[in-house]
Amino acid sequence: MYACSKNDDDAIAGETLVKFTIPSNFPAPAYNFEDNILTNAGFTLGKKLFYDARLSADKSVSCGSCHQQFAAFANLDHKVSHGVNNCQGKRNAPPLFNLVWQKAFFWDGGVKNIETSPLNAITDTCEMGTDIATIIAFLKNTAPYPELFRKAFGTAEINSQLLLKSITQFTAVLVSGNSKYDKVIRNEGAAFTATELAGYNLFKEKCSSCHTEPLFTDFSYRSNGLDLVSNDEGRANITGLSADLGTFRVPTLRNIEYTFPYMHDGRFYSLDEVLEHYNSGVKQAKNLDEKLKGGIALSAAEKEQIKAFLKTLTDNEFIKNTFYSES
Amino acid sequence: MKLSQYLLALLCPIIMLSSCKKNDDAVTADTKSSFTIEFEHQVNGAALSLNTTRYKNAKGEDFSISTFKYYVSNIKLTKADGTSYLIPESYFLIDESKSTSKTITLTDVPTGDYTRIEYTIGVDYARNFAGAQTGALDPINGMFWTWNSGYIFVKLEGTSPLSTATGKALTFHIGGVLDPNNTIRTFSAEINAANPLRVRTDAKPNMHFIVNAASLFTGVTDISFATLNFTMGGANSVVVADNYAKGLFRLDHIHN
């Protein structure tokens, strides 16, 4: 096998080479690049596509418009996504990182593979509002794309499979695992303050049954009692089961300091509002999770401690990594 | 990447294949050939023509068809002795509006006399959730749901004066692989042993199937367009899939 392993592409001296590294405190990923060999050229192409607004119907919206790096690739300040022609979508754009650990995508888990997850945004009339054929034609006729595809995949062909695989070479390497929390857990010389530690202990007691470490989600679909009757069917939209009505994927809490507004519809603008929801706002929805019946009582001091802990999940190395930025 | 590395990448699989193939020497290279399958689209015995012709469903309701396309996949051939051959990567999208799609060619098939053919109407479970696909399974073909991963196995669109939908539309997008709404169905046909599918190096037979688009609306449950005119997966799609599992395909004849 040694002889068959692909060498690094024509690496320019001094250029950062794309790497996919699994943090030592993380489990094995679900996606492993087996059928999509990661290369510098593939990553470079994927990143360019991610930031290219010309792919959208009115050339105003790129993936990066809704998934912004300074918001850990969520959509800062937008309750729900904002697509072409000023169209307002119905859901909050989730952050994009640690996607290779996910087996399903979207708030309702409707999409099952990271490679196919950009398709909905591309075709939704309220997101990029275009279609694959138009994008392929654009790429075939627009320098330097033909050259970039050739470099990435060694063929003159441009098709949806290569488009999606290259975008995935960008989105799949977005790994966030260098927060203060991680450095404490991995004994890398960092330590929690007394407040953070108190918050961590509260978190383990009250939150981690759903927001499970180390990814801060157990990937289940639940209702945390936002509404008595949810406007959005949530998971039931996919399964058709009434037991799933108004349930949504438990979101990760990594980089939560930067991914506001919160919840599937972006209804809360601050962590204070979120904690107050758990403290006093949980509604007795039909499918409300057992663990949240009666809410989670939190004193003012406890809220501050949990907030302090949640901020240790911020990974500035990830958010400020220029390797992932539009260049 | 340098040219030499490209060459290496190209050669590697060949080297690996040849080194693994050694014990398969019994199978000689010239025992493979091909055959074709032709799908002739009809509506209850009349030729299907898009948009222009009015047909009647089993309840006697008028309708016309503007789109009719479906997947045939995982084609498996069986010989009289019970041994069978699953044609690898056999995924085909048959589309009434693309006449070339209605004849498919199966290559590299071991020669022999086959007495049974079986295939999936739709796409197997795994490919519905797999990474980006190309060819027949390319989402560019408009047969992939982007918000709920999976393929539309059978798509029939048209109009009926009875439809209560906007523009009197009929929208039948059948797909979904999760219980209780799994719509994967298989079709099989026994082939008369007196005239089997004879795949020979010097003879490439043609199988001819009649495909009845009206079978979506009868067979198990007679569908009225007044009550069912739109389905995109879910329980109603199962009703339609159960119908077409009975009557979508009929093996008409084989030219050997």
Image (cartoon, coloured by chain):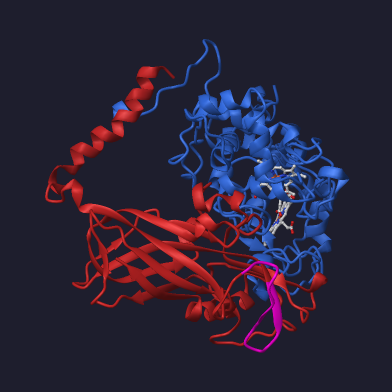
Chain colours: A blue, B red
Q: Is residue A263 above or below residue B49?
A: above
Q: Quadrant of residue A95?
A: top right
On the image, the x and y values in percent for residue A264 come to 76, 55
Q: Position of residue A171 (x, y in %)?
A: 60, 37
Residue that lies at the very extreme toward the top in this rendered image:
A13
Judge from the rendering whether residue A107 lies leftward or rightward of residue A101; answer left or right.
Answer: right
Q: Residue furthest right?
A: A86
Q: Which residues are magenta?
A: B49-64
- As for residue B55 lying within the magenta part, the answer is yes
Res. A57 in view: yes
Which image quadrant for residue A69? top right
Residue B212, percent from left and from top:
53, 76
Q: How many marks?
A: 0
Residue at left offset 82%, top offset 43%: A84
> Which quadrant does the N terminus of chain A fall into?
top left
Which of these two is toward me, A134 or A292? A134
Find out whether residue A86 is within the magenta segment: no
